[in-house]
Amino acid sequence: MSNDALLARRKKAVPRGVANATPVFADHAANAEIWDVDGNRYVDFAGGIAVLNVGHLHPRVVAAVSEQLTRFSHTSFQVMGYESYVTLAERLNALAPFAGEAQTILFTTGAEATENAVKIARAATGRTGVISFTGAFHGRSGLASAMTGKVNPYKWQFGPSLPDVYHVPFPNPAYGTTVANSLKALDFLFAADIHPGSVAAIIIEPVQGEGGFNVAPVELLQALRAICDTHGIKLIVDEVQTGFARTGRMFAIEHSGVEPDLVTVAKSLAGGFPLSGVIGRMELMDVVEPGGLGGTYGGSPIGCAAALAVLDIIEEEGLLARSAAMGTHICERINGWRSRNDLVSISVPRGLGGMIGFDILDDRNEMMPLANGGKVVAAKALGEGLVVLNCGSRGETVRILVPLTASDAILDEGLDRLEKALSAVA
């Protein structure tokens, strides 16, 4: 079956509400390479949207999942538990980016993780208010989409968002928003809309994903921690996209030295298998009564087996250091493109470790980010044999999420193809 034939079938059988970044269909993949059904080969700089930090079909993940499938595929942890769930929780607790005892509960999707983190914060504080940031992405379900700081396409067709969720501006130098602006807006929010004593949680991505790979400034995170401590608010860091070595640390919040109360995880946790979780301070996690949290598929034995293998791979293959080295190399290549007049104008690269993005700039408008510039480049890159994604509030950013297990040769091949795409749109 060809790409064209599958695309025609997809258009008839699947609603357009679930978008496709590319018009091609995967046939098989290995590490940082994908082949489509027409036999075309692509270098993968998308990683399934940050899911494949250890690459496609890492042998350790395949072996762990295969072994688990010889034993059982599902019981529902709520019906009959299994050791891999407990073992994974213990390992995540030991990795928690805060002092003191931790506990972990497992789910299936990132949206489940963010929603349940808020549920836990609400139960622990007896409050309902939640504060998020513009440009944030926390999922597409009810509460998660309310916390997401982008209307189109995540909110505008679906009626009013859930109440008691508020947004303040995220610092973004490209649009003139500073940390001082963000904190002033938070002060205004406390004065005009919700008393801090009614706020259960502030949720923030240490590096915004969908919002444009903008890094949360350390001074903002420190200020939020102080505000939370003063008013009894719980600080949730959303590490769904940033976690598990993507930024050169196990969790991106570790770059700041700020300790959260709750951490949401998903994506690369299980190397391509659906698994998510909330890691939190024990005194918060144990507040919820039995039955108040969970889900039929939450913490599936297949996902747990994969995740335990992923944690081994990160440690044994040195992926924290690998991520940092890859990020340095990627930034060097991007900075080299900035001075060339035969390529489209681009911004300084930004991000942490192997989580790097840059904006396509508008030569005709004072070098402001070019709306849909990243989307155009991503489409051109596909024609060069590279899968890469765009993001940003206006589609201006090219984001790089190459598997951390990619070889130097594959990394450079992908960057060469991206360079050609930037030339093609110049």
Image: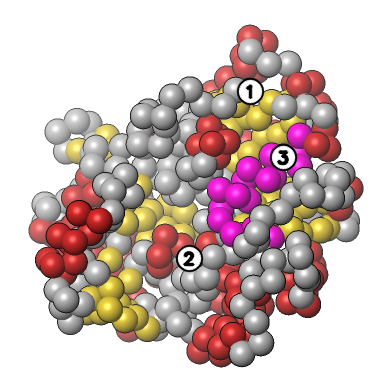
Q: Quick one: 152 or 356, which is closer to the camera? A: 152
Residue 13, above or below 169 = below
Q: Amino acid at mark 1?
A: Asp
Q: Mark 3 or mark 2: name the one nearer the start of the chain.
A: 2
Q: In the picture, residue 95 is in which quadrant?
A: bottom right
**Residue 9 seen from this side:** yes
Q: Nearer the viewer, mark 2 or mark 1?
A: 1
Where disc 2 sits, the SS reads loop
Q: Which residues are magenta?
A: 106-122
Q: Mark 2 or mark 1: name the one nearer the start of the chain.
A: 2
Residue furthest to the top: 192
Q: In the picture, residue 284 is in which quadrant?
A: top right
Q: Amino acid at mark 3?
A: Lys
Where disc 3 sits, the SS reads helix
Q: Which residue is rendered at x = 78% and y = 77% of the image?
A: 83
Q: Position of residue 261 (x, y in %)?
A: 77, 46
Where disc 1 sits, the SS reads loop
Q: Quick one: 255 or 111, which is closer to the camera? A: 111
Measure the alpha-carbon separation of dots 2 and 1: 31 Å
Q: Which mark is residue 115?
A: none
Numbered label tally: 3
Q: Position of residue 197 (x, y in %)?
A: 79, 21
Q: Mark 1 or mark 3: name the one nearer the start of the chain.
A: 3
Q: Which mark is residue 164?
A: 1
Q: Which residue in the structure is indicated by mark 2?
A: 51
Q: Which mark is residue 119?
A: 3
Measure the alpha-carbon separation of dots 1 and 3: 13 Å
